[in-house]
């Protein structure tokens, strides 16, 4: 176990944080694998992929406790933990399209399929930008070159993710307001499901804000060199988001839901 005087982090990563994160993400990801298999909702494999990405990141942090000077371990945890939430938000966007189908298309500004396609594509763009930035920063770090360009690219990817999520949240709020104004009857289980997805959205948004502020200050800034911020504003929100998907699993609420296509449509809005 090395000292943190030459640490790639600016501190020695906590073994407790690493093990806790690893165990929780492993357990949640295993459950997600089982839920994907039993529900046959194969698109939810994105949650398994996201969970595995988080696991790799925490495994790297545990190794960093043993050797906090390892640049490879530092870069591995940085890149994986930055891109992992993109998989969670992708699932979120698909889910909202399904909620619209259940509650009523007539209250939506745009067709449910458009929500799914547009926001998933936006999420994919964010993932690609963050991956490119992470790769560039990693290459620069290994050659002792300037990592500014790669860092800025990663920030751009996170900001794009945050912007697309902000637009998504606004559209969701408009939808909820229109449903409330119409006094539409929403099945109790769907109300619970919507609250669960709201929690996931909040957690991802908190994490995006944290990462943007963190990287904006650079690799030697105050936030990135103090682990408590990572643990509270990245690790905790992401495990809450993934576990929330376990508890409020789409397979329980939207698959083969009897309310789909049974909600009465406003005759003037049937073509929406």
Image (cartoon, grey):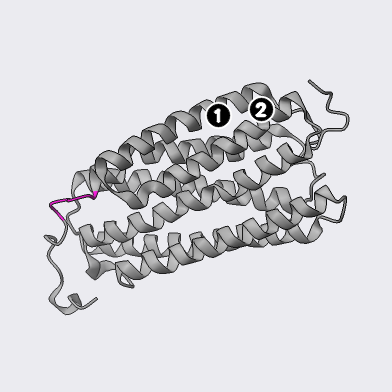
> Which residue is found at the position 70% from the left and 33% from the top?
227
Asked which secondary structure carries label 2, the reply is helix
Separation of marks 1 and 2 at Cα, in angstroms: 9 Å
Give the label on residue 22, or none: 1
State the count of labels.
2
Q: Which quadrant would the C terminus be assigned to in this image?
A: bottom left
The vertical placement of 10 against 1, above or below, is below
Q: Earlier in the sequence, mark 1 or mark 2?
A: 1
Q: Residues within 10 Å of mark 1 (few under 14, many from 20)?
A: many
The vertical placement of 143 against 28, above or below, is below
In this view, the residue in front, 176 or 2, is 2
Quarter of the image for residue 15 reads: top right
> Which residue is found at the position 48% from the left and 51% from the top?
87
Give the label on residue 256, or none: none
- The residue where tag 2 is placed is 62
Residue 133 percent coordinates (x, y):
69, 58
Asked which secondary structure carries label 1, the reply is helix
> Which residue is found at the position 32% from the left and 68% from the top?
113
Q: Which quadrant would the N terminus be assigned to in this image?
A: top right
Q: Residues within 10 Å of mark 2 (few under 14, many from 20)?
A: many
Residue 262 percent coordinates (x, y):
11, 60
* Magenta-drawn stretch, dominant element (helix, strand or loop): loop
Could you tell whether 115 is left or right of 157 in the image? left
State if disc 2 and disc 1 touch (CB < 8 Å): yes
Could you tell whether 145 is left or right of 175 in the image? right
Residue 136 belongs to magenta span: no
Could you tell whether 111 is left or right of 259 in the image? right
The vertical placement of 205 against 26, above or below, is below
Quarter of the image for residue 73 reads: top right
> Which residue is found at the position 17% from the left and 51% from the top?
256
Find the magenta span and give its range: 254-259
């Amino acid at each position: 176990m090395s000292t943190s005087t030459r640490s790639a982090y600016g501190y020695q990563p906590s073994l407790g944080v690493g093990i806790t994160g690893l165990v929780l993400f492993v357990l949640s990801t295993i459950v997600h694998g089982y839920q994907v298999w039993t529900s046959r909702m194969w698109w939810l494999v994105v949650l398994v992929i996201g969970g595995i990405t988080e696991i790799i990141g925490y495994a790297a942090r545990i190794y960093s406790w043993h050797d906090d000077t390892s640049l490879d371990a530092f870069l591995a945890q940085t890149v994986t933990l930055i891109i992992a939430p993109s998989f969670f938000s992708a699932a979120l966007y698909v889910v909202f399209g399904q909620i619209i189908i259940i509650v009523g298309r007539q209250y939506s500004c745009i067709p449910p399929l458009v929500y799914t396609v547009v926001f998933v594509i936006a999420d994919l763009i964010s993932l690609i930008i963050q991956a490119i930035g992470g790769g560039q920063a990693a290459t620069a770090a290994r050659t002792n070159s300037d990592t500014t360009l790669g860092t800025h690219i990663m920030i751009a990817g996170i900001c794009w993710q945050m912007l697309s999520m902000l637009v998504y949240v606004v559209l969701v709020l408009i939808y909820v307001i229109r449903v409330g104004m119409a006094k539409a009857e929403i099945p109790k289980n769907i109300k619970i499901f919507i609250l669960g997805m709201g929690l996931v959205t909040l957690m991802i948004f908190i994490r995006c804000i944290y990462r943007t502020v963190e990287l904006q200050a650079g690799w030697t800034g105050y936030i990135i060199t103090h682990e408590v911020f990572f643990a509270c504003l990245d690790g905790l929100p992401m495990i809450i988001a993934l576990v929330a998907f376990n508890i409020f699993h789409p397979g329980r609420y939207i698959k083969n839901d009897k309310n789909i296509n049974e909600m009465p449509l406003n005759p003037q809005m049937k073509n929406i």
